Image (cartoon, rainbow, N blue to C red):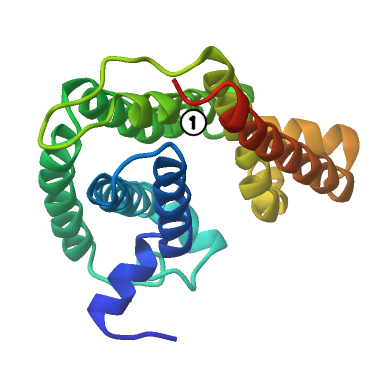
């Protein structure tokens, strides 16, 4: 296990989710015909934004994770919270100009996406409406890509309604998949998120299959829509 502060800080940023999200959005930008420099800008912006959300999540869940995930850097007291706060502050100061570099509309969309993800998840994490921040934030990704440009000059064309709807459904499916590993602890603490309520009705194994199948179908639909309807 990594023990240096820099590596622990990377672990606290939820790096796998951050890298995966940045890679998917960059690939989507490339498929949409964006030039390489804009694809790189999308990747950098999303990577910083996702790292920011990871640090914010671990800071907010520090006490909760101490009971459930003592192996995490913050909950295990192996990483100073002040270090994470400093990294989080730097990420906020960096993600704003990175977002604005896409254009005003795209920048405002991405910053709104981050706000919805951070605040909405904090307020609704253990409630039946836990899916709302995921649905809304994913629905904003097509707008972020559609309005994006370079050097602060974005495009005026909005995303298609089909792509927005499919992205929203994908957000709900991803929310369920990511919540499944922690459902036992969630149940012990009396949480009633949407994945928990669904798991109580269907059983966790069946919910895993259903959520996985839904995710695959939505991804396939997005690929088809991208080739037929297009992003904008």
What's the residue at 21%, 29% (across, down)?
107
Above or below: residue 47 compared with residue 29: below
Badge 1 element:
helix
Tell whether 203 sits left or right of 5: right
Q: Position of residue 148 (x, y in %)?
A: 27, 30
Compared across the picture, whether 158 is left or right of 231 comes to left
In the rendered image, which residue does mark 1 sit on? 138
Question: Could one spot residue 195 in this view of the protein?
Answer: yes
Image quadrant containing the N terminus = bottom left
Q: Which image quarter holds the C terminus?
A: top left
Residue 104: x and y in percent read 16, 23
State the image quarter where residue 170 is shown: top right
| Percent of width and height locating residue 61 | 42, 50
Q: Assess disc 1: are there few (<14), some (14-19) or many (≥20) residues with their C-alpha within 10 Å of its C-alpha.
A: many
Residue at horizontal 33%, vertical 15%?
157
Does 161 appear above or below 109?
above
Q: Please name the residue shown 62% across and 41% down the image.
A: 174
Q: Residue at point 13% right, 58% down? A: 86
Q: In this view, does 113 lie to the left or right of 197?
A: left
Residue 31 location in percent, x, y?
Answer: 47, 43
Q: In the image, is residue 148 above or below residue 11?
A: above
Question: 217 or 192, which is in the foreground?
Answer: 217
Of residues 57 and 159, which is closer to you in this image? Answer: 159
Front-most of 152 and 98? 152
Residue 190 in view in this figure: no
């Amino acid at each position: 296990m990594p023990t240096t502060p820099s590596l622990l800080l990377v672990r606290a940023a939820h790096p796998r989710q951050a890298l995966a999200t940045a890679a998917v959005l960059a690939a989507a930008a490339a498929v949409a015909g964006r030039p390489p420099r804009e694809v790189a800008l999308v990747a950098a912006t999303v990577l910083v934004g996702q790292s920011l959300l990871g640090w914010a999540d671990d800071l907010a869940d520090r006490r909760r994770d101490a009971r459930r995930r003592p192996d995490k850097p913050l909950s295990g007291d192996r990483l100073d919270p002040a270090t994470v706060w400093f990294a989080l502050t730097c990420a906020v100061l960096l993600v704003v100009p990175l977002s604005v570099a896409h254009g005003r509309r795209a920048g405002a969309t991405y910053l709104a996406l981050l706000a919805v993800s951070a605040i909405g998840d904090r307020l609704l994490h253990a409630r039946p409406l836990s899916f709302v921040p995921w649905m809304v934030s994913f629905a904003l990704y097509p707008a972020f890509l559609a309005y994006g440009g370079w050097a602060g000059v974005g495009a005026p064309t909005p995303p298609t309604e089909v792509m927005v709807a499919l992205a929203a459904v994908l957000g709900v499916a991803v929310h369920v998949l990511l919540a499944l590993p922690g459902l036992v602890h969630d149940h012990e603490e009396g949480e009633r998120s949407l994945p928990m309520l669904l798991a109580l009705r269907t059983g966790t194994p069946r919910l895993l299959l259903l959520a996985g199948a839904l995710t695959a179908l939505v991804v396939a639909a997005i690929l088809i829509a991208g080739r037929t309807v297009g992003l904008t």
